[in-house]
Amino acid sequence: TQAIKKSKNARIIRVNYKNPLDAWFNNNPINFYESFVILYKKVSGNFLTQEDTKNETKWEIGKTVTHKDWKPELEECGKNKFHACCKPIFCNEFRNKQDDKYIAIKVSKKDLYAWPNPSYPHKIAFRKGVVLYECDAEGNKIS
């Protein structure tokens, strides 16, 4: 931990985490439990992402989605992983079409991957997750 004095009454405290996943948990407002977290993703009106590509994925409520080519360490953006955000509203940076919906996904902590010094600090990679429900931009379940 390092404190940088900015003025008489203000300091910036930088914490040096050894594990990028610990940094991600500490720097994001996340709903997490002992062995899993609830993350959010934005999908099409038909619950699809990457439509009309070889990476098209269906995010069906109640189903488990598993990435078939899990290699998140290769790059922060692009293929080889699924992406989600700590809050639904942050997903707007990656997708924003007229009929889009937000979904909540339950992901085991062992299936997460965080990058050191990420370009998108609210985004995280995951290998497998259970699609729980459709939600609004605040994460509230839509019946």
Image: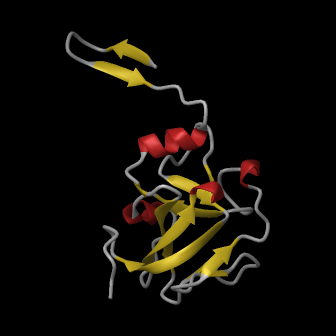
Q: Position of residue 25 (x, y in %)?
A: 47, 45
Q: Quick check: can you spot residue 88?
A: yes
Q: Position of residue 43 (x, y in %)?
A: 51, 78
Nearer-the-camera pick, 102 or 61: 61
Nearer-the-camera pick, 143 or 96: 143
Q: Position of residue 143 (x, y in %)?
A: 32, 88
107 over 100 or under it: above or below: above
Q: Position of residue 65 (x, y in %)?
A: 64, 77
Residue at the top extreme of this rendering: 8
Q: Quick check: can you spot residue 50?
A: no
The residue positioned 53% from the left and 63% from the top of the image is 84
The residue positioned 76% from the left and 62% from the top of the image is 70
The residue positioned 56% from the left and 65% from the top of the image is 107
The residue positioned 53% from the left and 57% from the top of the image is 35
Nearer-the-camera pick, 16 or 43: 16
Residue at the front extreme of this rendering: 34
36 over 136 or under it: above or below: above
